[in-house]
Image (spheres, coloured by chain):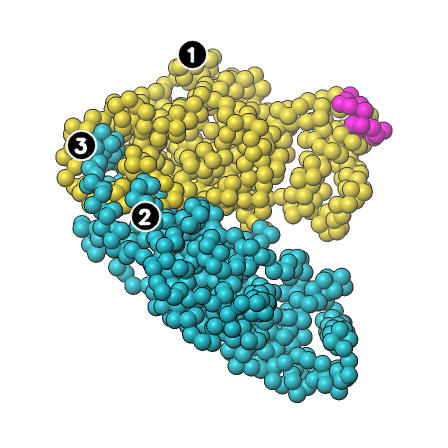
Chain colours: A cyan, B yellow
Amino acid sequence: MRRAGAFFAFLLAASPVLAVSDSELDPFINAMSEIQRRYVDETKAETALLLRSASDGVVNALDAESLVLDPAPPAGEAGPGFSVGVRDGVVWVLDVVEGGPAGAAGLREGHRLLQIDGKDAGGKKRAEIERALKGPAGSKVWLLWNDEEDSYREAQVERKLLARPAWRRVPLDGVELIQVFRLDGTAAGEIASALGSSPFAGGCVLDLRKCAGGDPDAAIALADALLPGGLTIATGRGAGGKGEHRYETTRKSKPVSVPIVILLGFGTRGAGEILAGALADHRRALAVGKRTFGYASRQKDFPLPSGEGRRLRLTVERFFTPGGVCLTGTGVGAELEAGEPLPRRIERELERYRVAERLADRLLASPPAAFDAEALKTGVLALAAVEAKGKSVAERRGEFERAFQIAVEALMRELDADIPRDALDQARLALISRVRVEIAGRRRTPDEALAVALREDSEAAMGADLIRALRKMPGAAQ
Amino acid sequence: MRAPGAVSAALLVLAFAGPAEARRNAGALKPLLELIETVEANYAGDPVIREDEVVKQALAGMVADLDRYSEFLDQQKYKDLQEDTRGSFGGVGIEIGIVNGKLSVIAPIEGTPADRAGLLGGDVIAFIDGVPTDDMKIMDAVHRIKGPPGTKVVLAIQREGEPMRDVPLVRALITPVNIRDAVLEDAGVGYVGIRTFSEHTAENLYDALRRFQDAHLKGFILDLRSNPGGLLQEATRVSDLFLPGGAAIVSTEGRDPSQRAKYYASEKRDIPQLPLIVLVNEYSASGSEIVAGALKDHRRGIIMGRRTFGKASVQSITPITPDRSQAVRLTVARYYTPSHNEIHEVGIEPDVTLPPSRYPPGMRRLFDEGAFNRFAGEVLLPAGAGQSGTGWLDPAALKDGRLAPPGKGSPPDKLDGRLGAEFRRWADRQGWHETDEAWAELESPVVDQVRIGVMRRVKGEEAARRYAVEFDPQVRTAAALLKLVAPAPAASRARTPATPPVSK
């Protein structure tokens, strides 16, 4: 792998200092002098102001990652609990933090953010949007967005300090799962060495679904650790399509060879996509989930000598997969898709009546005889052991679902809710999963609750199943 | 009319400003050039920016930050603008403006796609084809909405108190009608509505006022509601028609000496100087404010309605390339009423403030469903124009598009009651139920609209619009007031017409 620094030295040396030609500049100067001579308000015609506006005009025409950075500090570090990606001026919601305020207000990955505190988000720079979302903990931010059905939704959301590691390890019924939230240099090193350690020898599910940011070099470094030498990790293209650079894996005696399943989704963006593209193209990992967001580029900050401490952040390189696909706009597709999500209509009804939360409340407050009260106390929803004795798995499953169904119907009668019966039937399995996660969330440690949530998550479950299946194959790593 | 320095609000083309003098600025450009060169040498993002576009982006950014009405006109926009001044264009038929900082519908043009889709003055246009309008320039919005007839554009409309909704529109050929005149027979009042101040507006107004001469009228109503302005010259000429010779009309003030001018009324007097009421609203802007301001300052007419918009600036267009293919539109002057009242951001306060004209809640649905036209056609005139489907309407009156009871026995208000009841029964059958309470509010405007619907069916769109003036509550108020202030008709006071005051 060649270092990024070397690449930039090459780029700068190769591009001569361009002067803007007189004929290009003349219309600008004419317009400026016309403003200074005739514009009705003299205070707005000052040279410094006009030039500031002109600079904004240049920068605003660039992509959503390129902007002028002011040295001013941000208003606060707390946020509503999601990040955004921008493509063609549309602001997409990514990485909604589980249990965060935005998630509770109904914001989901793939929704389109329209306004923040009454101001349009569309067409703004990504850093500006992230900044507008941030503020002091406890303050509130008003959001307007389009959900997956293009319905307009709004909410007043509290900002919270949501501390989260860059990555975390979640053991999942004998399979190791790594959730990556931010693929930076430290995380890449830690993940690479973890994958080389003995607990991971049996394989790993690498969950990139909420990996919305990071450093391209970290992705390249991690891909390098997982791939044999002499392969292309990604290709980068510089200004004007010039300065193409191939990032290659280094020769090494023993790359980390554990079986890997990667989980991809709309929230996978940037560094995560570079890693996913390399692993998928070289068949080093099996990709489960959905197509990624589709934006991977590198930014670099340039000082503005006359800019009073301001810096210019520019996109200087766009990334392509080893197979030559431009990640920006295309992303990485998944090989396997897990279960279909519930229709939006049913989702909305379940959400509106908070069915999962209420069911959890009821089951915990007065456990029906069919369920195991002791297990419920530890956050596990299971049939009472007495009734379960001596029955086949299928019988027990059927019994469990019937008991659950009775609890649901009792709740519906009490709520007098207008949820059609066929909708509940369709949602039954999903509802059981949600109630399990809800109950675990209240009675177990955060780590245990997370493991339950991932076990009930169809994509993570499929990933774990795949790893287990791989282990059973002849010649698999043990 | 004396007018030192011909100035037009929309179009003024100065001699091309050469770069020589401006070169002095070049040294100051260093910070910008640094930025441009860094971008050109390093930027690799998407969208790809061509090198020759970077300076244009700088130019556009510089002009755009000045105000909402200033703008860089690239080759395409400049060409569009020149085409626009020629008359008809492809569009959806709305006038738009910035109200409370938001891009809004000022007024739909009657009979256009926007009108049929039920857009209203005051509707906020939040997105055009999915693009947010928050920082969008007026002209940018206009370009996005306009396009070849037959093509589609989707406006996301935010109406107060309602959820945002997408309104898909198919563009049509729009030919704005600028003057609409009618005689309100009952009140003996002449009505002229001016939509915008474009070429020939003053001339058309002059012709309308001349036509009124034979009608022995008590007064005029000049309707400038939702008139967004237009050509400064035409607005001064319209004012001129109502003011005594030598009266100041408007003054323009700018840093550029050529933009400092004072306009006065001419000495010609060949139309009757009758009592006048000027109707304005919050969407009367620019040229409308010149007319209303001048007539108010000279106490020539009573200004009635809502405080006006408050846009009192003049834009001028200057080419900035030797081949005149690119230009900038800049705000170069502000205008002031004769007593030097500030109009900008302030607007003109009417002498008589009227409540905003608003239909009762159920009317919107009936308009949206085309209920009045349908009722007129299906129930009252099922056999075609002029042939009633009922026994209780006078066939002779119907031929003129009017509704009257047969014979002389029953008074007109009894007919209104019958029309209302019939309509309500019919509406119930369509599934549009209303409570008795709501209906009490609805009956009167419904009957008015049914009458207009019949006129449209029999005599066509334009006749219906003239007829609709009679049912406009604010026009009715103005006519009632004129009846009080005006003496008996005195046609003899009007002098013989001389030459028209407007030269072409």
Q: Which residue is at the front of the view, B144 or B248?
A: B144
Q: Which residues are magenta?
A: B380-396
Which chain is home to disc 3? Answer: B
Real-space Cα separation, disc 2 to disc 1, in angstroms: 79 Å
Q: Quadrant of residue B261?
A: top left
CA gap, disc 3 to disc 1? 47 Å
**Helix, strand or loop status at disc 2:** strand
Q: What residue is drawn where x is 43% and y is 70%?
A: A195
* Residue indicated by mark 1: B499
Left or right relative to B315: residue B307:
right
**Same chain, marks 2 and 1?**
no
For the residues bearing labels 2 and 1, Cβ distance under 8 angstroms = no
Camera-near label (3 vs 1) is: 3
In percent of width and height, residue A197 lies at: 42, 74
A263 part of magenta stretch: no
Q: In this orientation, which residue lies closer to the viewer: B458 or B146?
A: B146
Q: Residue at x 39, y 25 (%)?
A: B79
Say which residue label 3 marks: B22
Q: In the image, is residue B395 part of the stretch drawn in magenta? A: yes
Residue B19 at what x, y percent from top left? 19, 28
Residue A30, percent from left and from top? 23, 31
Q: Label 2 amino acid?
A: His
Residue for badge 2: A245
The amino acid on which the numbered mark 1 sits, given as a three-letter code, is: Thr
The answer to which of A306 and B145 lies nearer the viewer is A306
